[in-house]
Image (tube, rainbow, N blue to C red):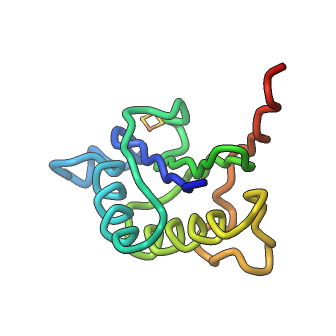
Amino acid sequence: MTTWITICDTCKREDWPERGMQITDGEKLAALVEAEAEGTPVRTRRISCLMGCTHGCNIAVQADGKLNYTLGRFEPTEEAAEAIVAYAALHAESETGQVPFRTWPQGVKGHFVTRHPPLPDAE
Ligand code: FES
């Protein structure tokens, strides 16, 4: 199953107005993640608001039938984008979506917000 990174493109960090950016922090992070994911098996998409607005930037890592995760508190940097895509690639390789902590890229540590177990098959 394909692992998708969903990036909130409307997230603004607390100091966004003072920084005078023309785009949101989420748009900046989305562009960086998209560029980093090119040529990898991981897919990306943008969505406006993951309902975690107070702790942006937020993303979700998901695949059918696997553990899914929401991560937040990212700054829109290349380092963050690299870590997000590297983690998503490990999620893609994992049968269950669980990635051993010892293999987590440093840049995702401290950013996990929620974990969602896969839905059971409906009967
Ligand atoms: S604006 Fe990004 S979670 Fe709401």
Q: Is residue 22 left or right of residue 48?
A: left
Q: Position of residue 2 (x, y in %)?
A: 55, 55
67 horizontally vs 48: left or right: right
Q: Give above or below for 30 relative to 107.
A: above
* Viewer-side residue, 53 vs 48: 48
Q: Which residue is more in the foreground, 12 or 26?
A: 26
Q: Quadrant of the N terminus?
A: bottom right
Could you tell me residue 44's position as x and y percent?
41, 53
Q: Quadrant of the C terminus?
A: top right
Residue drawn where x is 64% and y is 71% of the image: 90
Q: Quadrant of residue 77?
A: bottom left
Please tell me how many numbered marks the rendered image carries.
0
- The answer to whether residue 9 is left or right of residue 74 is left
- Residue 76 is situated, as x and y percent measured from the top left of the image, at 38, 61
Give residue 119's quadrant in the image: top right
Quadrant assignment for ligand 1 = top left
Q: Measured along the vertical axis of the image, is residue 4 above or below residue 78?
A: above
Could you say where residue 43 lies in the image, as x and y percent from the top left? 43, 57
In the rendered image, the residue lying farthest to the left is 22
Q: Nearer the viewer, residue 107 or 68?
A: 68
Residue at 56% x, 47% y is 60
Identify the residue shown where x is 62% and y is 67%.
108
User: Residue lying farthest front?
Assistant: 123
